[in-house]
Image (tube, rainbow, N blue to C red):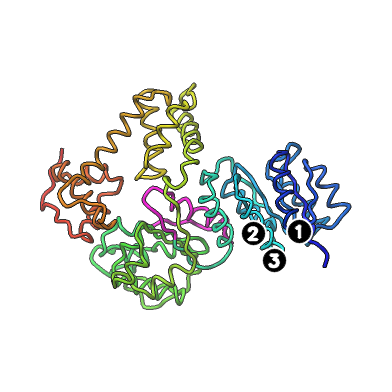
Amino acid sequence: MARSKILVVDDDTAMREMMALALGKEGFDVHPVSSADEAREAVDSAAFDLIVTDIYLGDGTGLELLEHCHQACPEAKVILVTAHGTVETAASARRLGVFDYLAKPFEVDTLVERVRAGLHRQSYGGKELELGPESLIIGNDPAIVEVYNAVARVAPLPIPVLVRGETGTGKELIARALHQFGANPEGSFVPLNCGAIPENLLESELFGHRKGSFTGADRDHRGAIESSREGTLFLDEVGELSASLQVKLLRFLQSGEVRRVGGERAHEVPVRVVAATNRDLRAEVEAGQFREDFFYRLAAYEIVLPPLRDRRSDIPLLVEHFRRHHQERLGIIELQPASTEVLDILVAYPWPGNVRELEHVVQRAIVDSGSLADEQMIRSLLAARSSNLRDVRSEPGIGDDLTLTDLEKRHIESVLRRCEGNRTRAAEILGIERKSLYRKAERLGIALDAEEVES
C-alpha cells in the first residue's frame, strides 16, 4: 500500500524539521519546504494527501497559499499551524476547506493524531471571509484555540448553542463570533440579559405583546425574538429563567413559532439562538432546578470557555491588546508596553474575574498612573482585589469544601454588608446590574433590606 504523502510548509527551520521527523517516523512520505513559493512548486509537480502549513510565512500566508493548493491539489486535507491564532483565522480556515487548526507549541503526538484524522475525514468547503482589523477574541493557548475550532465548526450550522464559562471569560464575544461566521452575518444580533429584567416583564421582552394586553401596554411591541429574525438571539444568564419561561421558550425552540402576549395567532420566526450561563446547568438539571427538556434543546452544541487562570500564557498578549485599545480610546500619545516585571505579577495572579478583570486592572493602571510599568501600582490594585476574596473566605464557616453557589452567596452577602445595604454600590463592586443582583439574591435566598441606603 502506498504511503500517504504529506507536504510540510514552515519557515522556522527547527519546527519544520521536527514535524517532518515526527511524521516520517510514523511511516508517512514527508516533503518539507520553507516558503509559500516552494509549496506552490511542490503541489504543481506532485499530488499530496495532506498539507501542514504555518499561517505566517516569509513570502506570504498559509491562507493565501490555500487557494493555489485547492486548484492544484483539490483532494488534499490541510492543517494550519500558528503561534498567533484568532477566532477569525480559525473560522476563515474552516470556510477555506481547512481540516484542522493547531496552535504552537503543540505536542508531537497531537500533530500525529490530527494528521491521521485528516487523512480519514472529509473537510469543509466554502469561501474566504475577510478578517477584521481586530480580533473579537485574543489568545493562542491550546485551550482557547479549541474554542476557536468549536466556533468554526458550529457557526454555519442552524442549531442552538450554549456557551458556558465563568463570569468575565467572554461569553458574549463567542456569541458574536458565532453570529459573524454564521449563515447570515448580515442579520441582527440581539442580546437579552435574562437576569437583568424582572420576570413579569421578561415574557413581553422575549415574545412581544399586543396593545392592551396588560396595564401599560399602550402600543404593539415587538420582542427580542422577532427583532432577531434571520439573525441571532443571544440569551445571556439563561440560567436565571423561571420554569414557566423555560416552557415557553422550549415551545418556541421546538416549533419556531412566536405568539405575542395577548396575541391570537402564532407566526414563524427563523432565528439562531445562542445562550450563555456561568452556572452548571447539567448539575441543576440533575438537582431538579432546571428543566431537562429545555436544557437539551438549548444545548444542541455546547462550548465551554476556559478561565484565564487555565491559559496564563495568553496574559501578556491580552495586556498588550488592552494597552493599545485604551491608549487609542483615551487619546494617550505615548504609553509604553508593560514591563517584564509587571507581566510576571499579572501572570501569577489567579484572576477570579477572568479577562474582564484583567482589562479593568489595565485600564485602572493607565488612568491612575499613565503607565503599565509601575510595579507598585499593579501590586496595590491586585492586593485590593485579593483582600475582597480573603474577606469572604475568612468568614466563619467558609472552607475549601464549599460549592460555587455557596461561595457566590457568601461573597454577595459580604459585599452587601461592606456597602451597608447600598445595592447600587454592591452591584458595581460585583460587576453586575442592580436588577441582576435582585434576581441572584432571590435565587440564593439572600434577604435584601426593604429600603436601600443611598449615598
Q: Is mark 1 on a helix, strand or loop?
A: loop
- Quarter of the picture containing the C terminus is top left
- Quarter of the picture containing the N terminus is bottom right
Q: Position of residue 297 (x, y in %)?
A: 44, 72
Q: Distance between the residues labelled 1 and 2?
A: 13 Å
Query: 210 or 288: which is nearer to us?
Result: 288
Span highlighted in magenta in the image:
163-192
Please rate how many residues cluster around mark 3, counting C-alpha atoms within 10 Å: few if below 14, some from 14 to 19, many from 20: some
Q: Is residue 124 visible?
A: no
Q: Up-down: is 438 above or below 57? A: below
Q: How far apart are marks 3 and 2 (CA)?
A: 16 Å
Kind of residue at badge 2: Glu
Residue 180 within the segment the image draws in magenta: yes
Q: What element carries label 2?
A: helix
Q: Position of residue 401 (x, y in %)?
A: 26, 56
> Which residue is the site of mark 1?
27
Residue 147 within the segment the image draws in magenta: no
Residue at 39% of width from left, 63% of height from top?
222
Query: 3 or 452: which is nearer to us?
Result: 3
Quarter-of-image position of residue 10 = top right
> Which residue is the site of mark 2?
113
> Which residue is the site of mark 3?
122
Kind of residue at badge 3: Gln
Q: Which of marks 1 and 3 is in front?
A: 1
